[in-house]
Structure formats: C-alpha cells, structure tokens
Image: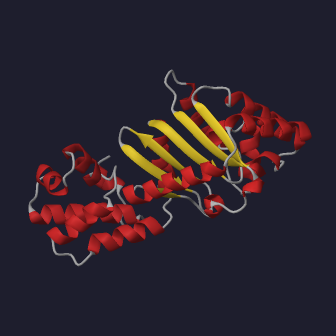
Amino acid sequence: MSSESRLNPDTSMWDWITDDLRHHVKKSGLSGAELARILNRDPSSVYNILNGRRRIQDKDAKILDKLWDLNHHFGRMLRYAKLKSNSKWFGQYLEHEVAAKVIKSYEALAIPGLLQLPEYAAELFTATGAADVNGLVEERMRRQEILKRDSPPMLWLLLTENVLDWPVGGAELMRKQLSRLLEEMEKPNIGLRIVPRAAGAHGGFSGSFLVISGDSGDIAYTEATGGGRLVPSVTEVREYGIRFDRIGQLALPEPSSRELVQRALEAL
C-alpha cells in the first residue's frame, strides 16, 4: 500500500497537511533534498514528513508559508490539527512508546497502563463502555513487553495519592495491584513518586500526560475526554516537560512514596 493511499485528508487534519505539502512541493518542482535544505532538516526527516510518518513543526510552517507566500496557511492548519482529537494519535503514540528511551508519565486517576494488572485494566475499560474489553486488555498487556527487554526504557512516574486509594475493582484487586506497584518500584529502570493530597493545587489538575524521549526526538501525549492528543511541537513538548518537573517538585521522595503505597495497601 502506497503512502498516498494510507492518507485520508477528508478525515484527518494531519493527513490534510501532508497532502497539501506534497501538492505545493510538486507544484514548485522542489526535490526532497532541496526542501530539506530550506527547512534546515535532515533529508530522511523530510522524507518521513512527506510520507506522513512525521509531522511538520511550527518553525517548518513559518518557513513554508513564507516560501510560497501562503498567508499563514500551514501555520493555521497546524494550529487546528493540534486542537482536534485524532483517532490515529494513540496509534502513533504507541510507535513512539515502543522506541522510547525514557518515558515520563503523570497520572492523576489510575495506575499507568504499563504497570496495570489485566484485571485492573479490564475494570477500567468496562467502566468506560469499551466494546472489546478482552482485546483491549490483551493489547495493553502486550505494551508492557517493552519493560521486559534487555534494555528497557527508563520509566519515571508521578502518581497522585488518589490513584492509590481509589478501589478500582474492589479491595482485593487493589491489594494485588498495589503489590505489583511495589514490586515494580524495586526495578532500577523505574522511578515512582507520589504527589500527596497535602500538596494542594498543582499543574497536574489539567489532566494526565506523558513525555517520551527516543532517538527520533521527544513527543508528548495528553489524555482527554473522547480521545487523547499527540503533541509533536518542540515548544509544547518542552512545556509538558517543565510541567512534569514542577509537579515532581511537590511529590514525595521515593522512600516516602514507597511507604505511602505500603500504607494504602495495608488499609484495604
């Protein structure tokens, strides 16, 4: 299947941007290498952009709009694409997760998917009215395989205290899930700290999010009602990284976090 046939500009703003970019590149007679020089990018990066595997960034949009005198066309499209929830985004996020070197995750409501027990995940999917709960649980368990690799990614987690004492699936299931959490906290590639309720209001009140770093760069993924949003913009990703650090300033140290998890388990 060609990259052209995979794109659907009628349903995806990102595909629309890629399709428009191809149109203007073809119309101007530019080669991929020439476009790479204009954008000050690696040719392979531009190749991936033109094939819909990577996204243009704010600085690219500015250069393209000035190059072809488009009156902020790409800049506006990029802004709307970032605002609109896209069904492809989670699939694209998973591609970054598999290749991740470092994953930073702030979770306000539930145990992060990479550390969930199957029963815990099933409770969450059932509660949200998912049609294929078993299939979704199997997919989530497959995602956890990245933590079993010879060189697993570093996983830095910030969880609110609410995550520990919200009894998803009942007390017995939560005891098992918190025991799993304590086991994972002993691994050298996993750092987990708890943001206590005593911290009061903080930057995480706007919702859960992740920042992923890999060889291809950094991206962020933020959760929202009805779907999440992939954040490829360097500026926005940096802002999420700063937010993660600021929330982390309010979190307990790892030993104290471990004690809090243990107390929550014992209280069930």
Q: Residue furthest right?
A: 267
At horizontal 64% and vertical 46% (from top left) the residue drawn is 158
Q: Residue furthest bottom?
A: 71
At horizontal 32% and vertical 54% (from top left) the residue drawn is 5
Q: Residue furthest left?
A: 29
The quarter of the displayed image where residue 191 is located: top right
Q: Nearer the viewer, residue 1 or 249?
A: 249
Residue 10 seen in the figure: no
Compared with 207, 155 (above or below) is above
Left or right: 257 in relation to 90: right
Residue 262 seen in the figure: yes
Compared with 193, 21 (above or below) is below
At horizontal 79% and vertical 40% (from top left) the residue drawn is 260
Indicate how the structure is coloured in the image.
Answer: secondary structure
The image shows residue 58 at horizontal and vertical percentages of: 32, 63
The image shows residue 89 at horizontal and vertical percentages of: 48, 55
The image shows residue 126 at horizontal and vertical percentages of: 75, 51
Q: Quadrant of the C terminus?
A: top right
The number of discs equals 0
Q: Nearer the viewer, residue 116 or 134?
A: 116
The image shows residue 38 at horizontal and vertical percentages of: 14, 57
Q: Nearer the viewer, residue 188 or 101?
A: 188
The quarter of the displayed image where residue 78 is located: bottom left
At horizontal 19% and vertical 53% (from top left) the residue drawn is 40
